[in-house]
Image (tube, grey):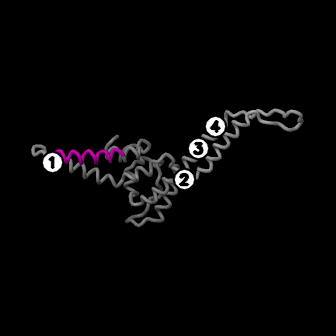
Amino acid sequence: MNSPDSWISCVWENLKGNEVEESVAKYKSVLMNCKKVFKLKLETAVFVDIIEKVMKEIQEFDKYVPLAVNLRVEGMMTRHWEALTEEIKKKWDLPGSPPDLISPSLPGFTFQTCIDMQLEHFLEISDDISNRATKEFNIQQDLVKMYNDWKPVVFDFVLMKNSQDASINRNFEECINLNDEHNGLTTNLS
């Protein structure tokens, strides 16, 4: 999948926003270089028209790239799609009525669906929501990591010498180190 037509029509789960962004940037660079090379040679000048046509298509698609990147972040969950729908409804100033629901769970949902809904006009909203989704996803991943870090830890309590009711954890240092590491991680979660 490496052309605007394939990105627009592919199954939503197969669209990779970052790959689209990288490919479009690469195409623009390669096409500019080709144009320079072919313009210099009289016998290959005919290719310049073809290059310019392809460049125009890429430039027309380029306005949708930030939308693809925003909507395909890993952390986009149902609640984010619902927030996107509600925010767009509030800011809708285009002809026609706003979409009732923006969600990849809709039948036949593709990037073309997003374009048909004119979502590229609401990049600020999609950017804000995708940033929020990414932060929440990262927090969730960190919490899962912390949970898994504590799973193998054994709290091995033994009675202290000369005491009937005071005990000490034999793995005290390991627990303190892990706790300190996770306190630092928790401080940086926001």
Looking at the image, residue 68 lies above or below residue 118: above
Task: Say the numbered circle drawn on residue 149.
Answer: 4
Q: Nearer the viewer, mark 1 or mark 2?
A: 1
Q: Which residue is mark 1?
A: 39
Q: Nearer the viewer, residue 174 or 92?
A: 174
Q: Which residue is mark 3?
A: 142
Using the numbered discs, state the Cα–Cα distance from disc 1 to disc 2 in whole angstroms: 51 Å
Disc 4 vs disc 1: Cβ atoms closer than 8 Å? no
In x, y percent, where is residue 154? 72, 33
Span of residues in magenta: 22-38
Label 1: element kind = helix
Q: Nearer the viewer, residue 59 or 14?
A: 59
Using the numbered discs, state the Cα–Cα distance from disc 4 to disc 1 in whole angstroms: 60 Å
Disc 2 vs disc 4: Cβ atoms closer than 8 Å? no
In x, y percent, where is residue 58? 28, 50
Q: Residue at x 88, y 38 (%)?
A: 165
Which amino acid type is shown beneath numbered disc 2? Arg
Name the residue furthest left.
43
Choose the circle earlier in sequence order: 2 or 4: 2
Q: Residue at x 29, y 45 (%)?
A: 27
